[in-house]
Amino acid sequence: MAKVILDPLIKGIRGKLGGLVYRLSPNGETIVSKSPDMSKVEWSLAQVEHRHRFKQANAYAKAAMADPVARTIYEKQAAEQGRKPYRMAVSDYFKGIDLLSGK
């Protein structure tokens, strides 16, 4: 893999531009890859259902981050475990943990 050090203006690029996808790796490096062509993919029923569950998990995480009490709990847990609060909320949704309803 080639490494390119760009000036500070370009260092912050991320997203899709043309046929390329720019990502920021967890260690802070910018990764450039070809944009995948998913136009001919036929998703299985299980994949469609999982995508739907993931959409619900993201909706839960957004609501949890908007709730001051739940956000405080997730921020505290995330600091202890070295994780991101939003990702912990998504994970909790899949585990069946719901801080918003008190279950």
Image (cartoon, rainbow, N blue to C red):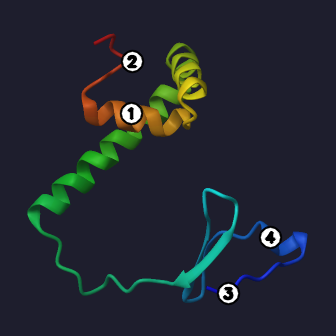
Q: Which quarter of the rendering shows the N terminus?
A: bottom right
Residue labelled with disc 3: 2
The reply to whether callout 2 and callout 4 are in contact (CB within 8 Å) is no
Residue 82 falls left or right of residue 54: right
The residue labelled by disc 2 is 100
Marks 1 and 2 in Cβ contact (< 8 Å): yes
Numbered tag placed on residue 11 in the rendering: 4
Say what secondary structure mark 1 lies in: helix
What amino acid is labelled 3 in the image? Ala
Q: In the image shown, does 102 or 84 lie closer to the viewer?
A: 84
Q: Nearer the viewer, mark 2 or mark 4?
A: 4
Q: Is residue 89 above or below residue 37?
A: above
Using the rendered view, name the quadrant where residue 60 is placed.
Answer: top left
User: Which of the marked residues, 1 or 3, is nearer the chain's N terminus?
Assistant: 3
* Residue contact between numbered discs 3 and 4, judged by CB atoms under 8 Å: no
Q: Secondary structure at mark 3?
A: loop
Residue positioned 62% across, 75% down in the render: 31
First-in-chain label (1 vs 2): 1
Task: From this view, report whether residue 52 is shown above or below residue 87.
Answer: below
Q: Residues within 10 Å of mark 4 (few under 14, many from 20)?
A: some
